[in-house]
Amino acid sequence: MTVSGSDSDGASDSALRAQRYEKIFRHSNDAVLIVDFESEAFVDANPAACEMLGYPREELLSLDPADLHPGEMDRIRAEFLSQVYENGSGWTDDLDCVTKSGQVVSTEISGAVLPEGETDGEPTRMVAMLRDVTERRRRKREAERTFVELEGVLDSLNDLVFLHDADGTMRYVNEAAVTRLGYTKAELLDASPQELSSREDVGRYDALVERVRKEGSVTFETTLVTAADREIPVEISTSKTRFRGDRALLSVARDVSGRKERERALRRFKKAVQQAAHAVFITDTDGTIEYVNAAFERQTGFAAAEAIGRTPHILDSGTHDEAFFADLWGTLLSGGVWQGEIVNERADASEYYADQTIAPIRDDDGDLEAFVAVSTEITEQKKLERKLTEQRDNLDVLNQMLRHDIRNDLQLVTAYGEMLTDHVGDGGDAAEYLQTVLESAEHAVGLTRTTREMSTVMLSNDADRHPVDLRDTVEAELENCRSSYSEAQITIEEPFPAVDVAANEMLSSVFRNLIENAVQHNDKAVPKVAISASERDGDVAVRIADNGPGIADARKEAIFNKGEKGVDSGGTGLGLFLVETVVEQFDGDIRVEDGPAAEFSDDVAGPGTVFVVEVPTASSAA
């Protein structure tokens, strides 16, 4: 048979292709089988197929495909063979093969029609390439199990976790994201990171993804918007990862609302401290100054740059000894708060007094972290205290003079004046002059007594109070006034409580002034004074009622003013002022009420007056 040139070239090309196919077939690392469509028999198998399935070539070619895929042939015909037959090619990644040893090998198979195997345009043979994916599937299953476990961990986190592609397609969200943002999981998976961000941050997404691509991870702050349109400030850390074999981005968002609020509060606090009128400085536990406010600079004369990094020793005036500072540091290092007065030295070497409080600052574990000191300058106050002390001492000397020297001399004048009465007749100028002397001397004695009592009040303080028997005090002053004013009827109404009150010896002057006032300013022929008392809620109310002319409403407050006295009064105008001052020192109260007093049983003409003194009992004041 003679072959023309063109026919010869065609045959040569076919031979070359056949040689190439044969070479690829024999040396391929993947298992390759040639399958007949009609009989479904194996026509050929390469060495890799024999090795993977464990059969010699001749034995493998004698097998029925069902021997390799027991129970799977119907599915193989429907899903794979028909696909190759109709489309010319096909693929499946879900096919198990049973080897000669009985081992199951997971494979993925791709198939294609062999052009040389067509008859009348219909395919008769196909080539099937099998790849062992057992290990890959094992890793995939392991990854799936790991992800399920990881999903449980991620769902337990308080942070919001998002797994998404670079284009924003959401692949996974944890339960915290669902709870905090108020969306369903399906809604979040259907959303993109841009759709969850505030309008101001939407445009940043592409730039952030590019940064992650270049740097591997990035941390930034943004704002997420909830389903209720509420904004949540968050800090997000985004990094590259893989999800089920594909590239993805893992974003972990932490709600920083609390931190933001603490930062705002810290800024407000720092601003308040910086603008405070008191000097504030903070040191570490070794005493090194770490912060000073503006008031510190003004108070000490040291600029912040000069003070920070140094110790408070720069303020040491040399006034205090080592024991003083040992006590201070001992209190602080034991966790206590130190408070006291200290003499410091300014940058210009001038001294000043300060009332200082130093407190420890502890960390979250309760360990000492630093100390904060608040210092108030009291230099002018100390000067005033010294001046007041001097005045107090001078007043005490004056009180002693009034109590002893002047009062004794006046009593001598009174005594000698009374002795002269026997030598002066009842009439005449001499008797009148002598009476004036006696009255003036008695008035002067009263003035010294009032002045002495005023100075006593001015020199006393709250610490001077102690239990005083109320009834004994009232009865003693009642008897004194009966002796001085024999024409008056002064009585105590029973029952009178037997109780101690928190007072001192000045309580006597309160009742003496009130009883004398009730008698002296009475316009009746027989002045009547009734004294009663009642105890309630830790206080005792003493009522001193008289049958006098009464006090107009307009004057009820004014009568307690210093120097205030009645039109016909010859007194100093200090009596009721003294009474109110003393009662207030006892944490008590005094008021005036109208009569006629219910204390009197007979018909009393005139409005009358009632002074009510309320003082705390000794037990309630303890």
Image (cartoon, rainbow, N blue to C red):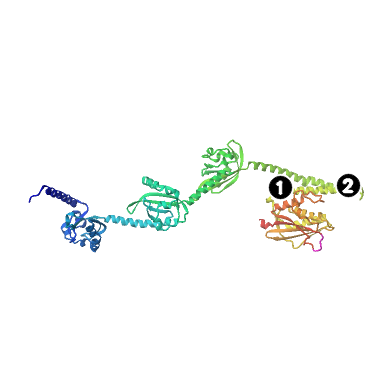
In the image, the segment drawn in magenta is 601-605
Viewer-proximal residue, 571 or 469?
571
Q: Residue at x 40, y 56 (%)?
A: 188
Question: How many numbered markers are drawn?
Answer: 2
Is residue 317 shown left or right of residue 566?
left
C-alpha gap between disc 2 and disc 1: 39 Å
Q: Quadrant of residue 523?
A: bottom right
Q: Secondary structure at mark 2?
A: helix
Element marked by disc 1: helix
Q: Is residue 35 left or right of residue 535?
A: left
The answer to if 428 sits in the magenta stretch is no
- Name the quadrant of the C terminus: bottom right
Which label sits on residue 433? 2
Q: Is residue 603 magenta?
A: yes
| Residue 332 position in % (x across, y down) | 55, 46
Mark linked to residue 417: none
Q: Position of residue 55 (x, y in %)?
A: 18, 58
Foreground residue among 389 and 64: 64
Name the one closer to the observer, 154 or 618: 154
Residue 262 visible to an observer of this rendering = yes
Q: Residue at x 11, y 47 (%)?
A: 5
Q: Nearer the viewer, residue 504 or 345?
A: 345
Q: Please, what is the three-letter code of the amino acid marked with disc 1?
A: Leu
N-term mark: 2 or 1: 2
Give the labeled residue for mark 1.
459
The answer to whether residue 416 is visible is no
Side of 162 where 363 appears, left or right: right
Question: How many residues crowd mark 1 within 10 Å: few (<14), some (14–19), many (20+)?
Answer: some
Q: Residues within 10 Å of mark 2 (few under 14, many from 20)?
A: few
Label 2 is placed on what type of residue?
A: Tyr
